[in-house]
Amino acid sequence: KAGVTQTPRYLIKTRGQQVTLSCSPISGHRSVSWYQQTPGQGLQFLFEYFSETQRNKGNFPGRFSGRQFSNSRSEMNVSTLELGDSALYLCASSKETGVYEQYFGPGTRLTVT
Amino acid sequence: AQTVTQSQPEMSVQEAETVTLSCTYDTSESNYYLFWYKQPPSRQMILVIRQEAYKQQNATENRFSVNFQKAAKSFSLKISDSQLGDTAMYFCAFLPLNDMRFGAGTRLTVKP
């Protein structure tokens, strides 16, 4: 079974631009969660999508948004990029929402200059 | 607040020896999962071991085992017969509902 895939793997953007990251979950998994990983803040939960609906959201500004499609693939968007948005963005999928094991993708490394 | 604390930022161990990484968490939930994830340098996050809170028996996966003390809210990871490939960041994670909470991580170096 293929694992969680994320595209692109690396991105360089400039301040003020917007960016869209993509995540394809493991086949049969319906929940997709997004995390931001930085050296200073560690791993922080962004949001979770299940059945095309946002189920839960972390403490991030509205510039961070996401969506999920009917095939469970998910995208996250960051608008008006700031230098502090430079991070590794990880996507994780699980069979269902709630207390289920999550499997992580390789991440997208975003650099904002 | 539901938090996860890993008090050891860095640890090292000699190859073939045993090392224990500590983790404590704070929650009022009764049903949750606990995980240890491994993130090798520049590589993907990998699940090492998981523990369901309702299970009293400690989870074991080959050389990896946990000491789960629910009352003390403690969840330590023991790595036996350490191998060079165990060198990585180890994250303790707590999943009460939908959003997984991670500790700050412990950087483990296995020395030959």
Image (spheres, grey):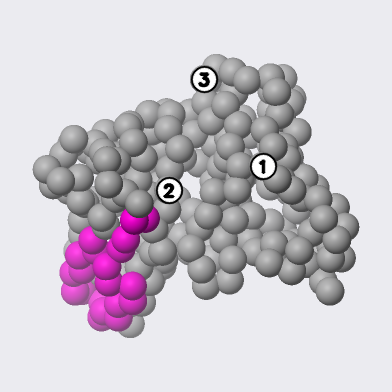
Mark 3: amino acid: Asn
Identity of the residue drawn at 21% across and 74% down = A16
**Which numbered circle lies on residue B61?**
1
Where disc 3 sits, the SS reads loop
Q: Quadrant of the C terminus of chain B?
A: bottom right
Point out residue B79 in the picture as x, y percentages from the top left corner: 77, 50
**Disc 3 versus disc 2: nearer the observer:** 2
Residue A71 drawn above or below residue A38? above
Q: Are marks 1 and 3 in contact (CB under 8 Å)?
A: no
Farthest-out residue, front:
A1
Tell me how many marks there are: 3
Q: Quadrant of residue A50?
A: top left
Identity of the residue drawn at 21% across and 68% down = A19
- Residue A59, visible in the rendered structure: no
Would you name the residue on which mark 3 appears?
Answer: B31
Q: Nearer the viewer, residue B109 or B1?
A: B109
Mark 2: amino acid: Tyr
**Inter-mark Cα distance, 3 to 2:** 20 Å
Answer yes or no: are tags 1 and 2 on the same subunit.
no
Mark 1: amino acid: Glu
**Disc 1 versus disc 2: nearer the observer:** 1
Chain at tag 3: B
* Residue count near mark 3 (Cα–Cα under 10 Å), binned few <14, some 14–19, many ≥20: few
Report the magenta residues as a range: A2-22
